[in-house]
Image (tube, grey):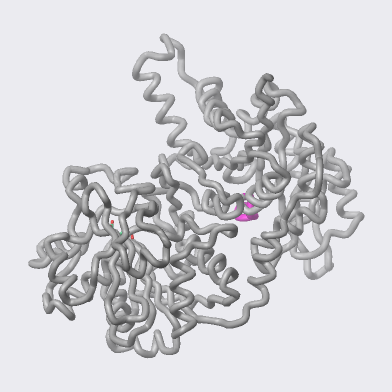
Amino acid sequence: MSKKETKYIFVTGGVTSSLGKGIVSASLGLLLKSRGFKVTIQKLDPYINIDPGTLNPYEHGECYVTEDGAETDLDLGHYERFLDSPTSQNNNVTTGKIYQTVIEKERKGDFLGKTVQVIPHITNEIKRRIKMLSKKDNDIIITEIGGTVGDIESLPYIESVRQLQWELGKTNSMVIHLTLLPYLASSGELKTKPSQHSVRQLMESGIQADVLVCRTEHTIPKEQKAKLAQFCNVGLGNVIECIDMDTIYEVPLYLQKQSFDEVVLKELNLPVGKEPNLKDWKTFLKKYKNPKRTVEIALVGKYVSLQDSYKSIAEAFIHAGSDMETEVKVRWIYSGELDEKNIEAELKGVDGILIAPGFGDRGIEGKISAARYARENKIPLLGICLGMQIMTIEFARNVLELSKANSVEFDTSTPDPVIALMEEQKNVVDKGGTMRLGAWKCSLKAGSKLAEIYGAKTIAERHRHRYEFNSDYKKDFEEKGLVPTGLNPETGLVETLELKDHPFYVGVQYHPEYKSTVATPHPLFKAFIAAAVKG
Ligand code: GLN
């Protein structure tokens, strides 16, 4: 039997950015997966950075890391959290990557003397990257095109979609256009004109939107839907409303109620079949909305003014919290203004403290104060990546009495480099993609808290760091009670620390938050919440 044809869905955005293309794509992915299709979602980012690894989180939010060690856009986190299946480096493409590949080929002489141009060379590379995902036996590939229709940067992507649709044939691909219906409070009206214009702009590029998903603060009256359908060449049923919701996890259900998935399947000439099975998803939402108790966790980080910077952590709290029928309120604490004097007031009453990942020395001393406060007051603490390194520095200074102990990241001449640069990092000059990245194995000590939490001897978690616990100090730490309980089986690198005689004082060099999904809440977050509940 010949392999069935892969179907392609392109998601474009109009009117403004930040409309939630990632959530709409992830929601559609979930609905189609729940109907039995093998789905993957890809993000095309029109910026020239090779990846977001070198970007300040204030620019595009958190940098997400895949199993295979790619530093990617945070939307890939949504895809994994909704679909409960891992993405890879092929799921995020940037203009930087496209040009890099084309220019490398040019240097090798692969273009045989031809003039290298946006069309066809750049567009061919974009199409190759989109089609590459069909090799994984996917039934449906959803490709989200970053940016807004009309942006200069997006043009090669839009042109590639046009070419691909032509090559694939009408029934094998479709375009969903996400747009905004602004509400004019003075006249009490939702306006359709900006959407009409952005659909027209797409048409000028040779693309007809097949479905409109309209972000709106209010229900769209029937007449407005009809107007959109008429002016934008789509069926009335293909105008889908996406009203602002309390939680992103409600979006798939809201879209499903309007038969969004059915509309899409019909456009792609695929059998509609039975209603998707969303029982577990609904249970998750029900538990999330009806918690039996509340805990408050202080998230101590330096990017607190932008919650997108710690997106995966915030979502991991939601998944684990729902599972445990516990509302997790997050108190965002800016570590740059935290010190020994105000720590008590700032952290008063919290049930747990999470020390966030990060880079650079801003806010470090505030994080150290938070680690000390949690250790001395026996408040549950979870330190992630830099957070674990902070716990190490604090313990070295205040328990091992190495008052100048530090990480070489912050003080290259510290007499006690308890956190040191990893050996393989010593000759690294380039910043992009050069950290220890992706999933690495970790062996957990029998009888440790972490072995119990995971219920396993060996785990694999995702990493993103250059510095590590300095094993020269391992014995000293162990003797005083901060015990390395998880080691990389090959290198002996310390992956986890646990404090004895403390209800929960756990540091991990890896990022558990990247693996938490709605269907599979992370055991470490669950254990942390359980400790906070016990308080
Ligand atoms: N800056 C630290 C390192 O590179 C921690 C990184 C992180 O928290 N992701 O090792």
Residue 534 percent location from the top left of the image: 46, 84
Q: Quadrant of ligand 1?
A: bottom left
Residue 156 in view, yes or no: no
Residue 27 percent location from the top left of the image: 67, 52
User: Relative to 58, does residue 139 appear above or below in the rendering?
Assistant: above
State whether the magenta stretch is mostly helix, strand or loop. loop
Residue 149 percent location from the top left of the image: 64, 42
Residue 189, picture quadrant: bottom right
Residue located farthest toward the front when viewing the structure as drawn: 446
User: Relative to 401, does residue 145 appear above or below in the rendering?
Assistant: above
Question: Is residue 173 one of those drawn in magenta?
Answer: no
The quarter of the picture where the C terminus appears is bottom left
Taking 430 as reference, is 283 left or right? right
Taking 104 as reference, is 369 left or right? left
**Which residue lies at the image location 59% right of the left edge and 31% below the top edge?**
137
Name the foreground residue: 383 vs 530.
530
Residue 93 in view, yes or no: yes
**Which residue lies at the image location 41% right of the left edge and 47% below the top edge?**
71
Residue 340, picture quadrant: bottom left
Taking 466 as reference, is 297 left or right? right
The number of numbered badges drawn on the structure is: 0
**Which residue lies at the image location 75% right of the left edge and 64% below the top edge?**
217
Residue 362 percent location from the top left of the image: 29, 68
**Which residue lies at the image location 66% right of the left edge and 36% below the top edge?**
140
Name the foreground residue: 483 vs 130.
483
The quarter of the picture where the N terminus appears is top right
Q: Which residues are magenta?
A: 17-21
User: Relative to 77, does residue 484 appear above or below in the rendering?
Assistant: below
Residue located farthest toward the left when viewing the structure as drawn: 415
